[in-house]
Image: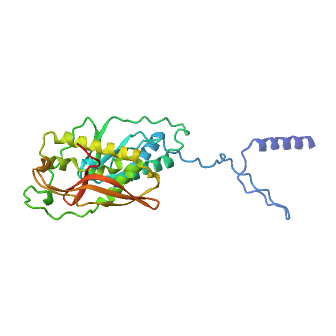
Amino acid sequence: MTRALVLASLLLAACERRSPPSTAEPAPSPPGVRAAEPAPPDTPERTADAAPPGPTCAERGAGALALIDEALAGLRACEWDVECVLVPIETRCGAACLAAVASDGVVRARAAVAEVDAASCETFRADGCPAPEPDCAPHAVSCVEGTCAARPATEPQPAQPEIEIPQQNAARLTEAPPRPPAGDAEERARRLFDAVVHDDPDRALGFFFPREAFLEVKAIAFAGEYWDRLLARYIEDIHALHATTPDLDRAEYEGLDLVQRGGWVAVREEGNRLPYWASRHAFIRYRVGAEERRMEVRVLITWGERWYVIHLSEFH
């Protein structure tokens, strides 16, 4: 009898080992004994959240160019083609080469490009991005509807609206109108002086007499080619003044003296079909320490109420 009971107990234990785990509530622990905490269910190992992927190399380059374009948007206002210039906008992560701005915005444009390059592109190559391949095909620039715009040099010049002749330059005038005051020529003369100091003619192109107005004023053959020569000489004069004027690193601009010499230039004088006021042998005043000095501006002439340089030095 005892042997049979032992065999029955062994069979019962074997069956319990094979049966699925019980879902019944565990038996209460004896008083004073803490029940064992159930084992947590099997769960995948938790990992830290992965950082979202950063922008691609192409996206970084496009983003830098977008920032530059936004910074330059307020530097493109113009009236004449001559007021517009091309500035380099290439960065370490951007492929564009040139953008159009007004000449009085050149310094701010260059500073904006440098700022974007430092903030967005410093680690571009170190991060494994390839060097950008700029498209530096020849470009031209024009003032189109009051905004400086660049275009491929192979594209035709945009059609220009017919220029309006200011009443101060009307051919019908029989006597001189009031001589215009210096007006904003003071500030544009400052830019001319700055161009000489930094050997950077682009800063002063907006102070040169506009081509469109020149073609209306002059009753001569090949007036456009003549204007091109005058502009080239203006640029050469700025370089020459930078090379020959001493102490520019200590010079401070003070003002423009528009002298009375020159007077009213009537129709048919100097090959003109339209009249204008002229100021000959004007001077930019500047200071080096306690000493006041002068820089000659050979001839300025008017278009409407504004004064423009036509000769920075003697020209034949």
Residue drawn 30% across and 61% down? 257
Residue drawn 45% across and 40% down? 58
Q: How is the image coloured?
A: rainbow
Residue 255 picture location, percent across and down:
35, 61
Residue 311 picture location, percent across and down:
26, 48
Q: Nearer the viewer, residue 96 or 308?
A: 308
Residue drawn 38% across and 40% down? 97
Q: Nearer the viewer, residue 202 or 3?
A: 202
Residue 176 picture location, percent across and down:
13, 61
Q: Is residue 254 left or right of residue 297?
A: right
The furthest residue to the right: 2
Is residue 214 visible in the rendered image? The answer is yes
Q: Is residue 198 left or right of residue 273?
A: right
Is residue 70 visible in the rendered image? The answer is no
For residue 5, which quarter of the picture?
top right
Residue drawn 22% across and 43% down? 227
Above or below, 292 relative to 137: below
Residue 79 picture location, percent across and down:
24, 53
Which quarter of the rendered picture does the N terminus lie within?
A: top right
Which quarter of the rendered picture does the C terminus lie within?
A: top left
